């Protein structure tokens, strides 16, 4: 059955005379999303301006979804959900998050998912990239840097040739504006929000742009808004070194089981000997042979000491002529589209160097400081050749909006240092750190000691009295 949401009164939408008012008055046609999900999972399309400077011009569709609140009496409002990325589709997030949230939270909120502009079912973009052009981080080596520069230039050129009319508008600030149009079209004065990884940055940008419309914001595995975006890529390297050191100590204490070395120094030497061997003779795995740089590219797995150790053991055995090793253990599966990643990373920030030699110098410097992964985040990216769009500068997040940040101690992608940066930017926030927590995600990974704080905040609006650390 299709239900229609009638036009809204201006008080829940935009001020009288605001050119966006017509978007608040659009009728949303809610229909069952698909036969693979329950009938209670509904989908609709919201029209938004492609260019918010020209709200009467070209429009695009934003695909949204919902699971209604469990109790009409206790309903507080809507909880928009973003899974991260950039480039991560979020349309199915209501049904994915529903079992992770307690009943008292589900009773109070309509769970709202959405595919951000340019992603999934929201007017998706593409660059016609070949599989080898969809890679993300390249190790630095003097002999291959020219090839890396050519790759970055080619990706940028192909994206602009294919989607140049849309690329300038695929930014975090415009996605935040889309969220506010969704808010108005749903008839809500304010929105609550749950964002993971990149979604924490998106949520923080929304609070900066629309502080009076921001209600209860949970930011899971936060990124430092001051680092967006080249700094975010480079900041992963120090965290990787810490996780690697922790792993060497863990593996050394279990030398009788794994045979990688009786001391942390021996385990470290075993690993780098393996990398050096793979550079001479790539190590066979189920997904093809890995050279040393490809092994280093799996650095994020070191936060999961019990999962990564058998992989290193298998690589060591395969290098000695044993059976092929398994693929790199996945930390968090990613479904980000390459085109949307570069559109947001390159379009959000003007701080990307234009001189390839700057990337060369930074890659050499960062690898010397952080041998495991320093060059991977510092090497050249397509943003070096992205066309200037004349768009907006990156958002400076600096406000007093209440928010709750939840963070694992051992997160390879959103490190505690990054989360602290978010905490400094959101003066009204509180932060809960899970001591010993591994991996990229707290709430999204299942039960943790942070759940009580999250539930209390979402159901009552009350934050912890101070930042705290739980677990052990």
Image (cartoon, helix red, strand yellow):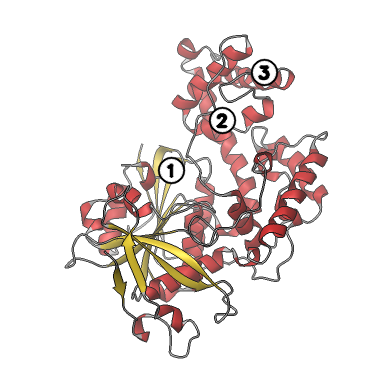
Q: Tell me which corner region of the image, top left, top right, bottom left or bottom right, holds residue 43.
A: bottom left
Q: Tell me the mark number nearer the camera, choosing from 2 and 3.
A: 3
Q: Is residue 223 left or right of residue 296?
A: left
Inter-mark Cα distance, 2 to 3: 15 Å
Compared with 34, 289 (above or below) is: above
The residue under the point 45% across, 68% down is 179
Give the image quarter of residue 114.
bottom left
Q: Nearer the viewer, residue 45 or 110?
A: 45
Q: Which residue is farthest bottom?
A: 17
Which residue in the structure is indicated by mark 3? 273
Give me the disc on residue 408.
1
Position of residue 329 relative to residue 212, above or below, is above
Identify the secondary structure beneath mark 3: helix
Question: How crowded is the residue under tag 3: few (<14 C-alpha within 10 Å), some, or many (20+)?
Answer: some
Q: Residue at left 49%, top 33%?
A: 330
Instruction: Indicate the secondary structure of the residue bearing disc 1.
Output: strand
Secondary structure at badge 2 equals helix
Label 1 vs label 2: CA separation? Answer: 16 Å
Residue sitting at x 72%, y 22%: 279
In the picture shown, does residue 288 fall above or below 407? above
Crowdedness near tag 1: few (<14), some (14–19) or many (≥20) residues, C-alpha within 10 Å: many
Q: Quadrant of the N terminus?
A: bottom left
Q: Position of residue 459 (x, y in %)?
A: 25, 61
Q: Earlier in the sequence, mark 3 or mark 1?
A: 3
The answer to which of 216 and 118 lies nearer the viewer is 118
Say whether marks 2 and 3 touch (CB < 8 Å). Answer: no
412 or 26, nearer to the observer: 26
Q: Which mark is residue 244?
A: 2
Q: Is there a contact, CB below 8 Å, between mark 1 and mark 2?
A: no
Q: Looking at the rendering, in which quadrant would you find the C terminus?
A: top left
Q: CA distance from mark 3 to mark 1?
A: 31 Å
Left or right of 431? Residue 124 is right
């Amino acid at each position: 059955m299709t239900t229609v949401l009638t036009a809204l009164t201006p008080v829940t939408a935009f001020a009288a005379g605001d050119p966006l008012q017509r978007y608040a008055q659009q009728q949303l046609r809610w229909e069952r999303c698909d036969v693979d999900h329950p009938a209670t999972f509904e989908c609709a399309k919201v029209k938004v301006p492609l260019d918010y400077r020209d709200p009467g011009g070209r429009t695009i569709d934003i695909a949204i979804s919902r699971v209604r609140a469990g109790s009409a009496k206790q309903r507080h409002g809507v909880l928009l959900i973003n899974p991260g990325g950039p480039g991560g589709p979020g349309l199915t997030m209501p049904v994915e998050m529903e079992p992770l949230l307690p009943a008292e939270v589900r009773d109070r909120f309509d769970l709202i998912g959405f595919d951000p502009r340019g992603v999934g079912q929201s007017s998706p973009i593409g660059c016609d990239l070949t599989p080898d052009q969809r890679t993300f981080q390249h190790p630095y080596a003097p002999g291959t840097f020219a090839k890396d520069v050519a790759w970055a230039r080619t990706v940028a050129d192909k994206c602009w040739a294919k989607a140049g009319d849309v690329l300038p508008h695929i930014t975090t600030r415009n996605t935040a504006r889309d969220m506010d149009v969704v808010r108005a079209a749903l008839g809500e004065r304010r929105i609550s929000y749950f964002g993971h990884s990149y979604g924490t940055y998106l949520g923080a940008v929304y609070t900066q742009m629309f502080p009076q419309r921001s209600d209860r914001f949970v930011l899971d595995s936060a990124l430092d808004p001051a680092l967006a975006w080249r700094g975010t890529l480079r900041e992963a390297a120090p965290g990787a070194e810490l996780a690697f050191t922790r792993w060497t100590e863990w593996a050394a204490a279990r030398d009788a089981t794994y045979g990688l070395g009786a001391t942390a120094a021996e385990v470290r030497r075993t690993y780098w000997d393996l990398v050096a061997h793979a550079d001479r003779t790539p190590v066979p795995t189920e997904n093809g042979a890995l050279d040393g740089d490809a092994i280093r590219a799996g650095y994020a797995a070191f936060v999961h000491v019990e999962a990564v150790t058998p992989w290193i053991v298998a690589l060591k055995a395969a290098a000695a002529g044993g059976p092929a090793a398994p693929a790199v253990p996945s930390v968090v599966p990613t479904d980000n589209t390459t085109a949307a990643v570069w559109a947001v990373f390159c379009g959000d920030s003007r701080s990307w160097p234009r001189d390839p030699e700057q990337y060369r110098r930074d890659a050499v410097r960062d690898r010397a400081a952080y041998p495991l992964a320093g060059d991977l985040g510092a090497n050249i990216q397509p943003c070096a050749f992205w066309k200037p769009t004349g768009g907006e500068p990156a958002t400076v997040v600096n406000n007093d909006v209440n928010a709750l940040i939840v963070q694992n101690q051992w997160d390879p992608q959103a490190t505690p240092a990054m989360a602290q940066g978010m905490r400094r930017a959101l003066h009204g926030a509180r932060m809960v750190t899970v001591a010993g927590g591994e991996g990229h995600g707290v709430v999204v990974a299942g039960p943790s000691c942070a759940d009580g704080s999250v539930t209390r905040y979402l159901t009552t609006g009350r934050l912890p009295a101070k930042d705290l650390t739980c677990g052990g």
